[in-house]
Image: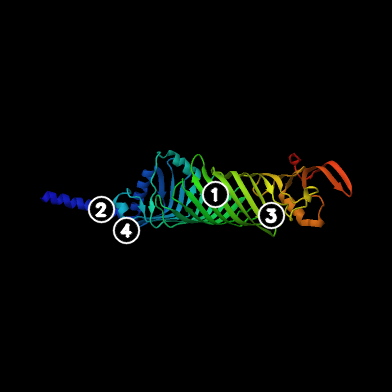
Amino acid sequence: RRKIAMLALATLLVAALALGWMMRTDNLAATVLGVTARALDLEITATGAAEYRLRGTPQIVVRDLTARMRGAGTPLLRADRILIAVPWSTLRTRGADLTITHIELDAPVLDIAALRAWLATRPPGDRPLPTLTRGLTVSGGQVIGEDWRLQDLDVELPSLAPGAALLSKLRGRYAGSGFSAPFDLHLGMTRPSLDAGLGVVGNISPETAAWRLPSRVRLSALVRDGETLRLERAVLGSYSRYAADGDELPFAFGIAGSVQLPGDGLRLRPVSLAVRGDGAVPTLEGEGSFALAQNLRLDLRGRLRRWPPGWPALPPPLGGSDAPLPFALGYAGPSDLSEVVTLQLKREDTAFDGRFRLTEMLAWRDRGENGSPLPPLSGTVSTPRVEISGATLEGVQIQMQDPDLPADAAPR
């Protein structure tokens, strides 16, 4: 009996010492991070001061955290501070119950390339999502892509549960290739999955050094995952204002089509487009493709309902009719629209085929009578018949050449 009592006392003493060691904040944090690192096959370190609380809802706070693939140079996640609160039920089941009360991340930085490299090493199969009863908050985050990034990212996610609808709020700024876009959006999904319905509403303001496009947008789509992330049956509506050089041009537009998000930008192909505007903004319908990555590429064909009164007048007989004008518009270059735009117009047997720079054309328009009578473009106008001052000319072709356009911008 004495030996049993001594053994029991020794066991209690060892347990008390182990519990005391575990209850030290640094040891507890190291233990939790070690378990997480082994489960995810990652190297996880936290060099800042740690905190924990066991009263009420247990929670742990770690600072200056870095997570990377074993042996990798670039971390997939860094954060100034992470708080995780879990109920006692999750602790009792050692994580078998994936219920988490709340997560907070301060200044996290997520590297997409490193994340994809780690995900490629993970075993196949469905990995269950945790349940977040009081959601997730992110403050001052960044997401780094190949040629783009999301900056100053704030996320408010009230709750998360597998199979349940998801609502969240996102604020931040997209930046890449001379193009940026501050945004403040509300996002909803039928369920937290890459196979769900998506709805987005809010404000986004694409901008370059030359122009801004503040917009109120509404998007609905079906999210699909494959070789690239896709938004199928996407419908986007927007009320926008084009602002440049002190001018503001309000208009509305709608886009419908398939959106591809390959990781280096976005592509819309095929896409249908409708624009409603006044003054210098045309009213048109068209279809084609749009791509934005390191550069912008646009190919659009459709019909102008009428020639905008804010544009330079068309030469007769193109300008002598109110019939809709079929058009083909093309652009490939920087996202600030500083390169050459191609435009083809046709009305009955009269056709225009030309190229110009949008910024120079708008500047020429603004100079009015004080500028050159000829627009800064290269192109041709061909028509079977023109009447001038009682004279009739047949088989007419007019050719214009802007010396400031490069040689490859000559009429096609």
Q: Earlier in the sequence, mark 4 or mark 3?
A: 4
Q: Quadrant of residue 392?
A: top right
State the mark number for residue 381.
none
Nearest the eye: 332 or 404: 332
Q: Earlier in the sequence, mark 2 or mark 1?
A: 2
> Is residue 373 placed above or below 270 in the rendered structure?
below
* SS under mark 4: loop
Q: Residue furthest right?
A: 390
At horizontal 68% and vertical 47% (from top left) the residue drawn is 303
- Residue hosting label 4: 54
Nearest the eye: 350 or 246: 350
Quadrant the C terminus occupies:
top right
Q: Earlier in the sequence, mark 4 or mark 2?
A: 2
Q: How many marks?
A: 4
Query: Dot 4: few (<14), some (14–19), or many (≥20) neighbours within 10 Å?
Result: few
Q: Position of residue 346 (x, y in %)?
A: 74, 44
CA–CA distance in space, label 4 to label 2: 18 Å
* SS under mark 2: helix
Nearest the eye: 251 or 154: 251
Query: Dot 2: few (<14), some (14–19), or many (≥20) neighbours within 10 Å?
Result: few
Q: Position of residue 373 (x, y in %)?
A: 82, 52
Q: Nearer the viewer, mark 4 or mark 3?
A: 3
Query: Seen in the image, is 52 located left or right of residue 331?
Result: left
CA–CA distance in space, label 2 to label 1: 48 Å
State the mark number for residue 17.
2
CA–CA distance in space, label 1 to label 3: 31 Å
- Residue hosting label 3: 281
Q: Earlier in the sequence, mark 1 or mark 3?
A: 1
On the question of residue 265 being in view, the answer is: no
CA–CA distance in space, label 4 to label 3: 62 Å
- Residue hosting label 1: 149
At horizontal 54% and vertical 48% (from top left) the residue drawn is 234
